[in-house]
Image (tube, helix red, strand yellow):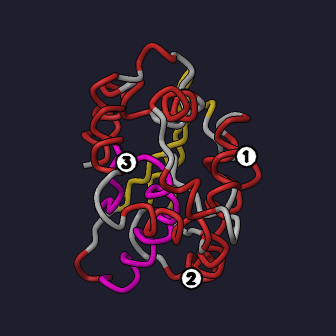
Amino acid sequence: MDLQDPLSVCPHRRGRLTLSLSASIDLKDRVSRVVAFNSYDYPQGGERGNLIARLIISSVRMPVLGPFFATQEPRPIFRAILQGGYVDKTKLPEDFITELLRSGRRKGYDKVGRGIFRSLKGFDRARERYPRVSAPVTLVYSENDWSKPAERDRVANALTDVHRITVPRTGHFSALERPDEMARILLDAA
């Protein structure tokens, strides 16, 4: 089971590891496996993509000006932020950017996105539950993912039945950059 949508973009991906592992504990008898791609359970994730991402995401979190920044998504800036998650920047599809921008303009979405960015520190507390995960877990990280090796090790060391895979020459958005490799990993895990 993987509750993560591999095509999701931050802030949604944040907490997916926490969510999928917590669900495997709570739904113990109904979960046979967890496969997580480039998931992370630390607050700084998307900010590590590039300088533009760091500036925009930290601005969205600001108490007074944050709501204003949360509604601003000029296409060139949004593209630059997303490109921080790619090794091969040509793999970022323009129609994907269009769809993300369209869905991000839905009523109330800016408040939800901002709320997620502001609540990320709370995801750290869920990490205490990881040792209770009984389902086998496959952790798949791209070589150039935003997570640091020590963070990946911390998650893996908290689990009892874990298999780790590192996908070479790939960034955070592995499902878009190397979809065939991601599909092969899922089929192998099944």
Q: Residues within 10 Å of mark 3 (few under 14, many from 20)?
A: few
Q: Amino acid at mark 3?
A: Ser
Determine the image quadrant of residue 101. top left
Q: Amino acid at mark 1?
A: Lys
- From the viewer's perspective, is 140 left or right of 3? right
Picture layout, residue 43 above or below residue 50:
below
Q: Which residue is mark 2?
A: 129
Picture layout, residue 94 above or below residue 45:
above
Residue 174 placed where, x, y %? 44, 33
Picture layout, residue 136 above or below residue 49:
below
Q: Which residue is mark 1?
A: 148
Dot 1: what SS?
A: loop
The mark closer to the camera, 3 or 1, is 3
Sequence order check, earlier mark of 2 and 3: 3
Q: Tell me where the magenta segment starts and ends, as one range.
A: 1-27
Callout 2–callout 3 Cβ contact below 8 Å: no
Sequence order check, earlier mark of 3 and 1: 3
Dot 2: what SS?
A: helix
Alpha carbons under labels 3 and 1: distance apart:
20 Å
Q: Residues within 10 Å of mark 1 (few under 14, many from 20)?
A: few
Callout 1–callout 2 Cβ contact below 8 Å: no
Determine the image quadrant of residue 64. bottom right
Sequence order check, earlier mark of 1 and 2: 2
Q: Of the numbered discs in the image, which one, if any, rests on residue 8?
A: 3
Q: Residues within 10 Å of mark 2 (few under 14, many from 20)?
A: some
The mark closer to the camera, 1 or 2, is 1
The mark closer to the camera, 2 or 3, is 3
Residue 16 placed where, x, y %? 45, 63
